[in-house]
Amino acid sequence: MKPVVVLDKIMETAERLFYEQGYNLTGINQIIEEANISKPSLYNHFKSKNDLLLAYLDQAYSKWFEDLAIFTAGMTTPFDRLIALFDYRISRQIKTDFKGCAFVKISGEVSNDNIDVFERTKKYKNDIKAHVIDLVKQLDRPKDRLLSNDELAETIFSMLEGSLLMAKINKSYQPLEDAKNIVRKLV
């Protein structure tokens, strides 16, 4: 069994608090107390709360894509992996009690001049979109289709993002299910 190291304690605590109660409502002293570490231990790893936030976002990015790969590991067709994006999001929202996207939440809290946060959010969203584009390009679609691959990918990505927001607002996965069913018909 791996011993729990200080950095793990800090990251686990920051992840939970930043996601559940928000960045602005989470203080350094709360993280120190709940992680059961000393202040110097925290500052040995992070110069500031913002540096900790950036590490949290980097970890959230990696974990999201790693978990998606695990979720879709047995799926062989691009269509199945595309539809699974909605199922993956549904499972995550149920697990988190419909708290929404960590990147969107944090972006809504930080000041507009916190470029590093917005760059990470942009990369995260663009990489999800790139994944959708890649899957759409792999689909065996008819030549006389209504939407081009780029238009279909943009539509699917927008539906994925919009239905996630509505799932959070409604505290229900039904918007994701509805979007998934529409995507099935579009493809």
Image (cartoon, rainbow, N blue to C red):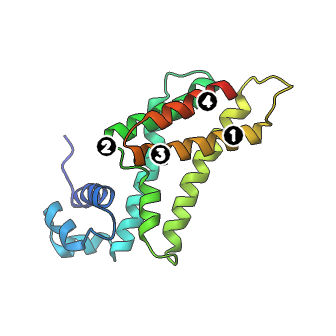
Instruction: Using the image, tell me which numbered label, if any, was put on residue 153.
Output: 1
Q: CA distance from mark 4 to mark 3?
A: 15 Å
How busy is the neighbourhood of tag 3: few (under 14 within 10 Å), some, or many (20 plus)?
A: some
Nearer-N-terminus badge (3/1): 1
- Labels 2, 4: front one: 4
- Labels 3, 1: front one: 3
The amino acid type of the residue labelled 2 equals: Asp
Mark 1 near mark 4, Cβ–Cβ under 8 Å? Answer: no
Q: At x 51% / y 34%, what residue is drawn?
A: 86
Q: CA distance from mark 3 to mark 2?
A: 13 Å
- Labels 1, 4: front one: 4
Kind of element beneath mark 2:
loop
Kind of element beneath mark 3:
helix
Residue topped by disc 4: 182
Compare residues 97 and 166 and report the one nearer the observer. Answer: 166
The amino acid type of the residue labelled 3 equals: Met
Kind of element beneath mark 1:
helix
Q: At x 19% / y 73%, what residue is drawn?
A: 29
How busy is the neighbourhood of tag 2: few (under 14 within 10 Å), some, or many (20 plus)?
A: few
Name the quadrant containing residue 135: top right
The amino acid type of the residue labelled 1 equals: Ala
The amino acid type of the residue labelled 4 equals: Ile
Residue topped by disc 2: 97
Q: Is residue 54 left or right of residue 142?
A: left
Nearer-N-terminus badge (1/4): 1
Q: Is residue 9 left or right of residue 62?
A: left
Residue topped by disc 3: 166
Q: Is residue 187 visible?
A: no
